[in-house]
Image (tube, helix red, strand yellow):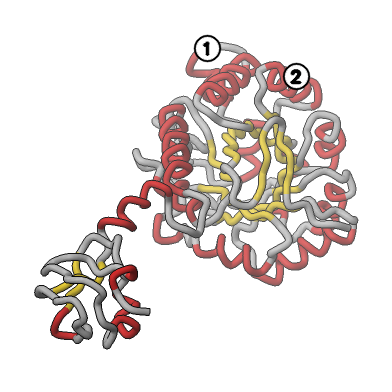
Amino acid sequence: MKAARKIFVGDHVIEKDGDPVIIAEIGVNYYDIAKKKKIPLLDAAKFMISRAKAAGAHAVKFQSYKAENLATKQSPAYWDTDKEKLRNQYELFSQYDKFGEKEYGELSAFSRKNKIVFMSTPFDFESVEYLDQLVDLFKISSSDITNLPFIAHIARKGKPVLLSTGASTNQEIREAVRTIEKEKNGQIVLLHCVLNYPVAYPDANLVRIQYLQKAYPKYLVGYSDHTLPDKHMRVLLAAIIMGACVVEKHFTLDKSIPGNDHYHAMDPDDLLTLNENVRFYRNIRGGTSSFMPSEINSRKFARRSIVAKVDIPKGTAIAPELIAFKRPGTGIAPKEYERVLGKKVHCDILADELLQWSKIEK
């Protein structure tokens, strides 16, 4: 098994030090958009795909599940119940599980036609089977990082795996990665994530991106964000600067819609801002360990040379009190100071004149 250092996502590539691939997680937010616009669910989902594409997302991601396969009827909430009032997981998820193979197949085809990558996170074995025909890569939720039989089943499909690591210990991450590796699948992207809705800024813990890079140098590392978006999209930009080569964030068309994933999602304006940040970062990032061509004149004229402090008559031996260090840097460099001392000059040198090797004895 060879670890993949490049993973192709449609026309885009997830790779170390490459431009970040942006995933707009529509999730199940299209249910509320459909209700607000009074349009069918499929139309709302397609409309959100189109808006995500127009704002610069490289991929859209949904969630595939049936509430009865996901949670018991007594599962308590783990989200902020001030934002999402429901306190029971089964009750919440059963409102958003109407789509199946037929609907996701139509969304996959629509995405392909609009040149944006279609993804959906499976939450049960049945979803994995039909999504295998519809997606080019799988995303595994943080909530399933200890569901090793499920992870193994997905890994056996042989497609790239994006593994979220929210709420996990380092040992749990290692076990999940080894489970994928045992299935001879080396196409892994580890996504740092904090499994809370919303995540307070001090809890974003972006340094874990760098921990994952050091702990898993063979694999790619990204970031799945649940913080509240600020107008400058600074959290995702910071994650990209710290090395995230793929970033994922929930996507909505209206952050004011109460409940579910709207309040901590980005909207099209936020996505445009994020892409503007990426372009700016790409401009300033550079790619050389040496100086820039634009600095050539500075190297010549902003540096110093050895100059005559006073008039130095022909035949005079150069002494410390006869010289100084001044700009420009087109004469003998100050680092040659020791070589110059004691040498005689071949001709008169005027005060403030740059010393040149041609005027000094060998």
Q: Residue furthest top?
A: 39
Can the viewer see residue 74 in this picture?
no
Percent position of residue 128, x then y: 82, 39
Position of 245 with respect to 331 (left or right) is right
- The quadrant of the image that shows the C terminus is bottom left
Percent position of residue 111, x then y: 68, 22
Which of the pair 31/315 is nearer the observer?
A: 315
- Residue of label 1: 38
State the image quarter where residue 301 is shown: bottom left
Which of the pair 311/54 is nearer the observer?
A: 311
**Mark number displayed over residue 109:** 2
- The quadrant of the image that shows the N terminus is bottom right
Can the viewer see residue 6 in this picture?
yes
Position of 6 with respect to 293 (left or right) is right
Q: Amino acid at mark 2?
A: Ala
Query: What residue is shown at x 52% (from left), y 38% (from top)?
Result: 261
Badge 1: residue crowd in 10 Å (few <14, some 14–19, many ≥20): few
Badge 2: residue crowd in 10 Å (few <14, some 14–19, many ≥20): some
For label 2, the SS is helix
Query: What residue is shown at x 32% (from left), y 85% (from top)?
Result: 338
Q: Amino acid at mark 1?
A: Lys
Percent position of residue 278, x then y: 47, 40
